[in-house]
Amino acid sequence: MKVMFTIGLMLLAMSFAVAQDWAKKRLETSPRHQEWVDIKNGSRTVKAFVMYPERKDKAPVVILIHEIFGLSDWAMSMADQLAEKGYIAIAPDLLSGMAPNGGRTTDFTDATKITETVSGLPQDQVTGDLNAVADYAKTIPSASGKLYVAGFCWGGKQAFTFATNRHDLSGAFVFYGFGPTDPADVARITAPVYGFYGGNDNRINATLEDQKKAMAAASKPYEVVIYEGAGHGFMRAGEVPDATPENAKAREAAWKKWLEVMGRVPTIEACCETSYSF
């Protein structure tokens, strides 16, 4: 049984990598400026992928936190899509220094080790890396000073957690990730949080009622939308060439809503009602 499970993970990881050729092509043909930067977190060096928009004024920054699959071509293509809409996007590789020989996501020779390593990353290290990235973002000359965080799957959980630790965020966007329910953690949140979830993802959705209650009890703004028929990971799965209609529809709707919310940026004072749908 263990062997079959391991083989299943290997096949999943292999198909995941092959299925992202379309995302890689987008990056290769993008007209926007892209670069890699080294960001220091104490003794650690975090490699981060940065995409810049083509605009004449300063731009808000979105920190993108990757899935459990590490910093993939799809995660970087999301940075390009945000840049296309006018945002500076920074996607740190939180596996920096964690691969064999001190490499990052692309330096793993066994794709199944990526998910295992991401799952085992120390929380303090992740938070420290993200704080370093946020600090760097605020020094970018073309940045406006407005800062968002967004994450997917494992990264969604990290985006929610980061909102408990970073108090200069204008918004946190959680895509199908768990959130904190400890009152002490929730009390530290200062940014509005927006959750995007697939209807066919009860592993995550079964926790949402407790999450809503915890946020409401602390008068923290938390808006949730559930896309019926969509599965876990629909932001990526909805883009693949053979996407199901449900995932594709959810991806399109969530992308539109995400951009809309960043455009209006409600304040905490104006957004404390216990309404849980967009």
Image: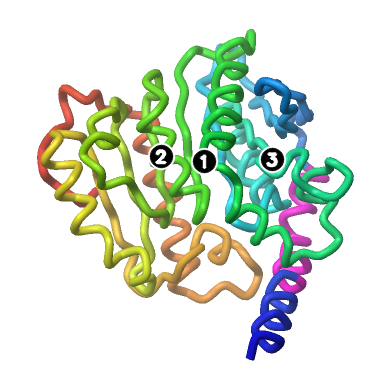
Residue 123, x across and y down, in percent: 52, 41
Disc 3 and disc 2: Cα gap in Å?
Answer: 17 Å
Q: Residues within 10 Å of mark 1 (few under 14, many from 20)?
A: few
149 and 261: which one is in front? 149
Say which residue label 3 marks. 93
Percent x, y of residue 21? 78, 61
In the rendered image, residue 194 lying in the magenta stretch gets the answer no
Q: Amino acid at mark 1?
A: Gln
Q: Tell me, yes or no, whether the two marked residues, 1 and 2, touch with CB atoms within 8 Å.
A: yes
In this rendering, would 260 be left or right of 217? right
SS assignment at label 2 = helix
Residue holding disc 1: 123
Q: Which residues are magenta?
A: 14-29
Sequence-wise, which precedes: disc 3 or disc 1? 3
Question: What amino acid is at disc 3?
Answer: Asp
Q: Is residue 63 left or right of residue 23?
A: left
